[in-house]
Amino acid sequence: MDSRRAPRTVSDPKVRKVGFFTAPPDRSLSGPPDHRIFSFLTSPPPVVDNSSPSAGNSLSPVMIPPPRHSSANLSPLRRDSAEYFPPSASPTSFSDDVAAAAMGRGAVAASSSLPGGLGFDIAALKSAASSVPASGLTTVSVVNNFPIGISEKGGGVAVEMQNDQSTRSKSLKEKTTKAERRALQEAQRAAKAAAKAEGGTTPAAASGAAASVTMKSTKSVKPPPSLKNDSATVAASEKKGGDRPPEKDRKKEVPQPRMQYDDKSRVEKAKRRAVVKQTEARNRVELFRHLPQYERGTQLPELESKLFELDPMHPAVYKVGLQYLSGDICGGNARCIAMLQAFQEAIKDYSTPPEKTLARDLTAKIGSYVSFLIECRPLSISMGNAIRFLKNRIAKLPLSLSEMEAKTNLHSDIDRFINEKIILADKVIVKHAVTKISDGDVLLTYGSSSAVEMVLLHAHELGKQFRVVVVDSRPKLEGQLLLRRLVGKGINCTYTHINAISYIMHEVTRVFLGASSVLSNGTVYSRVGTACVAMVAHSFHVPVLVCCEAYKFHERVQLDSICSNELGDPDVISKVRGREDINFLDGSSNSAILQLLNLIYDATPSDYVSMIITDYGMVPPTSVPVIVREYRREHLWI
Amino acid sequence: MWCRSASFILDKQQNDTVSNLRNPPDSLTPASPPPLSMPDTLQNPNPQNNISAYYQTRAAHHAVVTSDWLAQAQAAVTREPDGAPDTSVPPVAGKPFSVIDEFNSWRKQPDLAEAVAAIRALAAVIRNCQATTMMELEIELKKASDSLKLWDATSISLTAGCDLFMRYVTRTSALEYEDFNSAKSRLIERAEKFGEISCKARRIIAMLSQDFIFDGCTIMVHGFSRVVLEVLKTAAQSKKLFRVFCTEGRPDRTGLRLSNELAKLDVPVKLLIDSAVAYTMDDVDMVFVGADGVVESGGIINMMGTYQMALVAHSMNKPVYVAAESYKFARLYPLDQKDMAPALRPIDFGVPIPSKVEVETSARDYTPPQYLTLLFTDLGVLTPSVVSDELIQLYL
């Protein structure tokens, strides 16, 4: 199917144009766009507007508020929209920006619901966004001030780049920094480093010095962490709207800023705490240095030997961690369920130490388990949501409960989470998705998604006549497992690799994809290659249906697959197991000029997704934020 | 959703317009037709299977209003007062009040949309209900709405209207704590309010869309939609100067009827054959269409030809506006044209068609959201993506 939204350039100006022409000619608003914006942003409305209500235009018999008023003086409808666009959008008001961004689509809707000529127009606002970071600039503003990680990445990248002393570093640095102040400092820093390098010292010393300088200045540039945390907290809680939990809870709900693995000092600190001693891979790929990458296969035997001696980790959790590490458990739902069940075990065996409260101590305990699991393999978003749920349940336990009761409570809560959010949700998804399969369809799926598999099997059980194309890719070849199960059930299948996707697509009528997560802008975050499949399907006008449980939704916004991703073992893409004759890279994989990139996930823009099938029904990707907003509370407090 | 209805723009002017639109209160009291047994009502009373009942209704409504209709309406009104004593045998508890008859009596009014008729009929169900507990009442209501939906499965607005009514009326937790009679009266109150809002919807849409019609513009319309007519009528009444291009609307020639109506209002109209849409699109400033149903993606299902008109308009960068009441919002999500229940309709080609030749008889198509600019609804002016948000908030 086509993209859901037309490119913005086509439709937006039309809205504006119509409104523009609605104005009677004597209305004084034919000025240049920035003038109009300005009149909107400076809150007192132009007097000219007020004095000319559209009565002259005789909208009989009722009065519709004249279209050009920027301020909220007339009707509730108008006032709403005025609230969405805070009059003073200064670069520092993070909360406002993010709130507006959260309401983004609503705001767009509301503002376009202003009949005719909006006092301001979104397109024009966007164009002026460089001077005024206004709220019209929804997604971008979120990305800019939202994850703390990104700004750090800017700094971190700069550090590495300076070491390389490449000319490219400057442009990249410029791109990643946001605040002007910051840019200024970076420029100074660059100048300093250049001066030092020219000063006749050895290159190594120079780069070291530069790095140290950079470190220092980065630190000084960074606003105090508490402040940052606060702004993030406000931002996060703004999203939920309605009743805010008290300050304490809000702090808890904010996820920790993601580790940026090119930030050396933090990596050092993290290493000291780590249980799993991982060796970091040396040749890390440009642009992906902020992601952790380890030498594979070195740590497993050692860890296995430690199984019986470690005290802080519960054996069940330890086992799951090792299974993640070795890749025995993969797939979003499987990993999440395994983790929750391990936590269940751990909670069962838990006893509160003397002079401690269960809620606090258990939370800390779970926290340490989680960081262990992260060391084994970075968490998926679904796991993050599940952990958030569990921690919330622990925090909300009534103090009056005895330890035993509390533990059984948590046990049943986890059970319910697994049942309702994963197992039942899958059933609902299957029920919905099957209605979209009709006789004679050719369904294409990529990789191996548990939800899609259930859909296909159920449709087959219902006696629908269809054919499945399983598309697969190196190095995991997960599709073969799916293929085997489907063929075992007697479903007519075709198996191909992603290289042949454009060949096979013309005979396909529906594409069913799984997802690791769906983000708030409708971006589908899924197994690498999914974006490619979705784009090819889109260009062939084949509808793309994404099956994803609602607990995997996340309020984050992501525009590319770079800032958050996972790096797999680079060796598996350079070597083909059992094929010695084609392992041409054998000797050179340790070469300093060879960088191997094995990405695990990618982000599919929402334009290429026709529909998201979730446990709340079939929704367009634009409605993901609504579900996140409406159900997050219920999701947390079940 | 309904609380946020943009109906405030009508509430402001408490004048004749509204009260004229609203039916006289005595007509709200239900007639009690001879009670039918449930099996009867559940049978699809529509014998012609290859023609959707929806289009039969439309055909009946969109034909010119005749004195015949007036006589019928008269009869319906006069029947009402003695309707109540007519039920000398009070309906036995458990035997439901025939919602279909009620519906049919409402449906006869050409100005009343099918969904509003259904809403009215369901309101009557609540009023006539013999149930003594909330649960029974709800079950009965559910049965009635199911039988209504079954009456014509192809009509999207009927199904959507019934569903919305059920949600609107029954969705509250407070009902459980009240005693039955007050809860019931609250339900009735709500049902009436819902009916009223639905009735006013067309007027609200007409008001909201006025700002988009500017002097000297050229509007292209397709088919006959009462909402669009209302919009254009209001614009004409407020002395706006515009001209309208009407497509012919084959095969039931609904465009001809619309052009008749517009000519009566002294609006300059040009009639086009359906295939001249692209030819004339250059001169057009905006496209205005109604909708049979608004689906979850934000797209619309409407009379055959809307999709191609929207495609042409989109490729020429002309805005496409949809006027649709919010009771047409349906929880459907068609992926493509074939992915919906077809509503079939006979087509008269004027000459005999050899039996070997196949005829596409589908009566409506699906226009995906990316070809629509804005939707004018009684909830306000929405972009297509907001439709789904409204639906989610309402149904979940």
Image: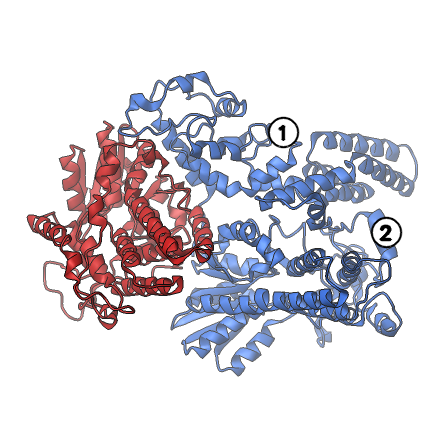
Residue A494 location in percent, x, y?
Answer: 50, 75
Residue, x 75% and y 68% (percent of image)?
A: A404
The reply to whether residue B344 is visible in this rendering is no
Q: Are marks 2 and 1 in contact (CB under 8 Å)?
A: no
Q: Which of the two discs, 2 and 1, labels the residue nearer the N terminus?
A: 1
Amino acid type, residue under disc 2 in the picture: Lys
Residue, x 73% and y 75% (percent of image)?
A: A580
Question: Which residue carries the number 2 mark?
Answer: A269
Residue B36 location in percent, x, y?
Answer: 20, 68
Name the tint of chain A in the rendering. blue
Name the one closer to the observer, A195 or B246.
Answer: B246
For mark 2, give the secondary structure.
helix
Residue, x 49% and y 69% (percent of image)?
A: A430
User: From the image, which quarter does the C terminus of chain A lie in?
Assistant: bottom right
Residue B19 location in percent, x, y?
Answer: 24, 38
Q: Give the crowd class for mark 1: few <14, some 14-19, many >=20 residues within 10 Å.
A: some
Amino acid type, residue under disc 1 in the picture: Ser
Q: In the image, are marks 2 and 1 on the same chain?
A: yes
Name the one closer to the observer, A560 or B34.
Answer: B34
Question: Which residue carries the number 1 mark?
Answer: A90
Name the tint of chain B in the rendering. red
Left of A337 or right of it: where is A17? left
Tell me which chain the residue with mark 1 is part of. A
